Amino acid sequence: MSTGFDIEALRTMVSGVEQGSFARAAIELGRSQSAVSMQLKKLEQQAGARLFVRKGRGLVPTEAGEALVQYARRIIALNDEAARAMGAVVAPETVRLGLPQDFYDDIMPATVERFSSLHPEVNIAVHAGNNHTIHEDVTAGRLDGAIAFFPKNSGVTGELLCELPLYWLAHADYTQPDEDTVVPLVLFNHRCLFRQTALAALDGSGIRWRAALTTPSLPAVWAALRSHFGVGVRIGHSVPSDVVSVDGRAGLPPLPPVELRLLGSGSARPLARDLLAVLKDQAMKLIGHPRQGIQG
């Protein structure tokens, strides 16, 4: 007996996976949660396999579920392409872009502007969040293309774009503390690569430190550094003019560089490939050299 997957059920499944919540998918699609549950159950019956398992308060795809999500995206794209060719009105296609907050002011708008000039009818959903979640979102298919930081020689899949140095940064009027002074740090939340690198370097050098401020927001990091809260670690990109490198002061240890990698979801959609090409082009134009005068 042949199996024909329900196209609207496939849309529901893809939306739930991309948003990380079937409750949010139900709201976006204008359906009740019970209707969404029935659609997922119908897909499992059609597939003859368990597609999702409960994790905490949500559902996560099984191996079979992840495979069907990849096919579903292609099926939906072909269905909508055929509908448009026949003159039917369908919802605009969406591509999902991810990047660290460091690049929100320049690479993000440059990429969106260029991609929109090539595909003015396509919606672009931008996720500018924590670096450690970006790779997970690409792997899970919630993002079509992204750039993210990784440790040097990480061996992570994706294309290596460049290596970028890390800097100890503080306000231009930062006063070098005594050797016995505990270094006040402005840090991102746990799992931040820059946070982990800074703490490993300090601990390895036997330098005492304290967390003066912890935040998930890059603007909050800049505000804290500009308000003399302490020292932070970032790349030399989009650094405020009154924040400078304090490398070498108070015996601060050297920091290893990080890799910047281009990540793709493996989607066969031409739009996803175009997004990656534009993102790579804009990233390489705008990254690579710290701003003039960052060295303190």
Image (cartoon, helix red, strand yellow):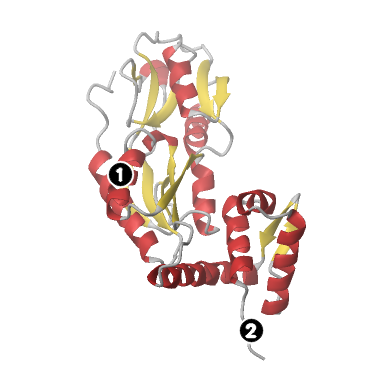
Determine the CA span between mark 1 and mark 2.
41 Å
Q: Which residue is painted at 54% across and 52% down in the image? A: 136
Q: Is residue 288 left or right of residue 200?
A: left
Against 240, residue 55 (above or below) is below
Q: Is residue 67 left or right of residue 42?
A: left
Task: Check disc 2 and report the residue beneath it.
Answer: 3
Q: Looking at the picture, which amino acid does disc 1 mark?
A: Glu
Question: Which label is found at residue 64?
Answer: none
Q: Which residue is painted at 44% across and 58% down in the image? A: 93
Quadrant of the rendered structure where residue 144 is? bottom left
How far across and down, in percent of the image, does residue 43 sit? 68, 72
How far across and down, in percent of the image, does residue 242 sit? 33, 15
How far across and down, in percent of the image, does residue 146 sit? 41, 50
Q: Is residue 183 left or right of residue 57?
A: left
Circles 1 and 2 in contact, beta carbons < 8 Å: no
Tell me how many marks there are: 2
Q: Which residue is painted at 71% across and 60% down in the image? A: 36
Against 235, residue 154 (above or below) is below
- Counting residues from the N terminus, which is met first, the one under dot 1 or under dot 2? 2
Neighbor class of circle 2 (other Cα within 10 Å; few <14, some 14-19, many 20+) is few
Neighbor class of circle 1 (other Cα within 10 Å; few <14, some 14-19, many 20+) is some
Task: Check disc 1 and report the residue beneath it.
Answer: 113
Q: Which residue is painted at 39% across and 22% down in the image? A: 169
Instruction: Locate the N terminus and report the quarter of the image it occupies.
Output: bottom right
Between 72 and 280, the one lying in front of the other is 72
Q: Secondary structure at mark 2?
A: loop
Q: Secondary structure at mark 1?
A: helix
Q: Looking at the picture, which amino acid does disc 2 mark?
A: Thr
Against 246, residue 149 (above or below) is below
How far across and down, in percent of the image, does residue 191 sit? 56, 39
